[in-house]
Image (cartoon, rainbow, N blue to C red):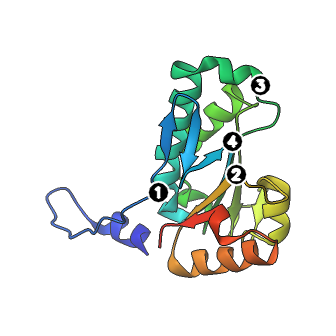
Amino acid sequence: PIVDLLRTIRPGDDILVKAMGGLRLEFKENGIFWQGRAIKSFGFMAGGTGLAPMIQIIREYMYYVTERHPSLLKGIQTPTLNLLYAAEEEADLAYISFLQGLQTEYPKIFRFHSVLNSPPLGWTEGVGFITKDMIKEKLVFPPQDDQLIVMCGPPIFEKIMTKNLDSLGFAPELYYGYS
């Protein structure tokens, strides 16, 4: 995994990386759009370093609703950004203080839940892998046309998450995977 590479490289080392392309969201005056469809809520599923594109989307969304269109904040009743973040162990979790700060400052907009495969003693969040029940409880459910689920992680992670979404009734146009 990329985590192993990141732990072993040193300043001055050369590495070759490949761009992934990405999700093309349109932040317009009248809303956020993906493939011509208005999106009102996002569900994010990140495995390990798959959190990186989620952070970019979350930052842009927060800027959009807090700086460009603060009137949108008045109409938000339930969190519109919901993140399930899975990692092997607690040391692998990145941006936790950033995520906790957002959740504290904007509880009506953002919430996240961490899931660890090897949790430390006393861990109070998710244990194991992201399950269908976690998707139903922590993301937006049932599936709706104005939502988008975005996932990024190792290929096996995205394959399993896609199967989970399909079995929960999410049509392929309601989710996007980076792999």
Residue 110: name its quadrant: top right
Q: Earlier in the sequence, mark 2 or mark 1?
A: 1
Q: Which residue is mark 1?
A: 23
Question: What's the residue at 60%, 69% (across, down)?
Answer: 88
Circles 1 and 4: CB distance less than 8 Å?
no
Specify few, some or many for label 4: CA neighbours under 10 Å numbering under 14, 14-19, or 20 or more. Answer: some
Secondary structure category for the residue under label 3: helix
Viewport quadrant of the N terminus:
bottom left
Asked if residue 48 lies left or right of residue 116, the reply is: left
Work out how far the residue at label 2 is from the one at label 1, CA to CA, in angstroms: 14 Å
Q: Are discs 4 and 2 less than 8 Å apart at CB? A: yes
**What amino acid is at disc 2?**
Gln
Tag 3: residue type? Gly
Query: Do residues under tags 2 and 1 come within 8 Å of each other at their CB atoms?
Result: no
Q: Who's the residue at 49% across and 48% down the image?
A: 25
Q: Which residue is mark 4?
A: 40
Mark 1 / mark 4, whichever is N-terminal: 1
Q: Amino acid at mark 1?
A: Leu
Q: Residues within 10 Å of mark 1 (few under 14, many from 20)?
A: some
Q: Earlier in the sequence, mark 4 or mark 3?
A: 4
